[in-house]
Amino acid sequence: MIKTNIPCEVSIIIPVYNGASTIISLVSKLIKELVSYDFEIILINDCSNLDNSFEVCNKLATENNKIKFLDLSKNFGEHNAVMAGLNLCNGSCAVIMDDDFQNPPEEVVKLITKMDEKFDVVYSKYSIKNHNFLRNLGSKFHNAVASLLIGKPKGLYLSSFKIINRFVINEIIKYTGPHPYIDGLILRVTRNYSTVTVLHNKREDGKSGYTTRKLISLWINMLTNFSIMPLRLATYTGFLTGIIAILFSIYIAIEKIMNPNLPIGWATTVIAILFLGSVQLFAIGIIGEFLGRVFLKMNGTPQYIIKTKVNI
């Protein structure tokens, strides 16, 4: 279909991954909630492989020109899918939300209303989170690491349910690397943020697409794409182990002088070699991760590839 490119008040960006059972109801409720706004809903199918998400999203878009649909050629990941939506949205602001009803449609208006107070970004926060224990623990760890590495303000919860204005959208989409991290991009653009307390529902169907592997991948993205702290950590660790080695050498020399017959044990030698070797491998691994990501970007690895567009 022909792209309209007509600006609107708000874009709703929803990455879809095996969400066929919920997306019809979610879109229907969003349309009812946003009846007083000029809006567009952008569905991005991240190569769902367990259901007919493509057919469902495609049908929704062909029946309603307020719904736009992007089908990615393979599974690029949630943040890459969101980047695809941000690059093609026309709203003066964009709400980013999940496809599983854990972000209730009726709470979207709260974010939009708060955005009217001239904030660049408004994050949702939850009085009660309906994730399992391990997922909540992972979220706490993620937020703690974000505070250390990318300067996340203390007390700010980096929720995936948020709204950003056109200024932030335009800055974010300048990033073309293959490993985007949305919150890292937001926080390097602005600190003009606020929060709104919203409900957090249980998943209506299926299970989370965020496996342990994907969560670890997200943390690595944050570590290597938006901070040089790991490289500094390797430097500090090398400096510290050097001091320890010097002190240990002095200790051994003094012991030998005071007791010439004292045999120097092989155990301490092995421990020292293993310890220093592990530090070196750790540092090399971190440097390799940084260099590998630079190589992938220089090699033109795509952030996403759109296979099908509807209403765009």
Image (cartoon, grey):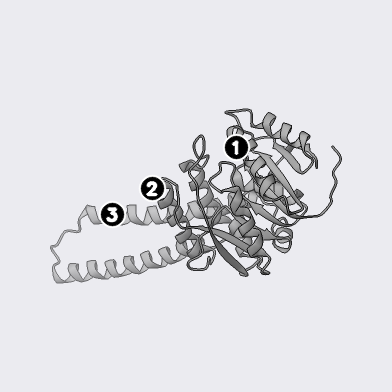
The kind of secondary structure element at disc 1 is loop
> Image quadrant of residue 67?
top right
The answer to which quarter of the image holds residue 264 is bottom left
**Mark 1 closeness class: few <14, some 14–19, many ≥20 residues within 10 Å:** many
Does any portion of residue 18 appear in the rendered image? no
Q: Is residue 260 visible?
A: yes
Above or below, comparing residue 84 to residue 92 in the picture:
above
The reply to whether discs 1 and 2 touch (Cβ–Cβ < 8 Å) is: no
What residue is disc 1 on?
Answer: 17
Nearer-N-terminus badge (1/2): 1
Q: Depth check: 257 or 286 in front?
A: 286
> Whole-percent x and y of residue 309?
77, 38
Reading the image, the residue beneath label 2 is: 133
The residue to which callout 3 is attached is 271
Decide if residue 202 is on the left or right side of residue 64: left
Mark 1: amino acid: Tyr
Q: Where residue 212 sits in the image (x, y, percent)?
A: 46, 43
* Residue at image point 40% right, 56% down: 279
Q: Earlier in the sequence, mark 2 or mark 3?
A: 2
Query: For the N terminus, which image quadrant?
Result: top right
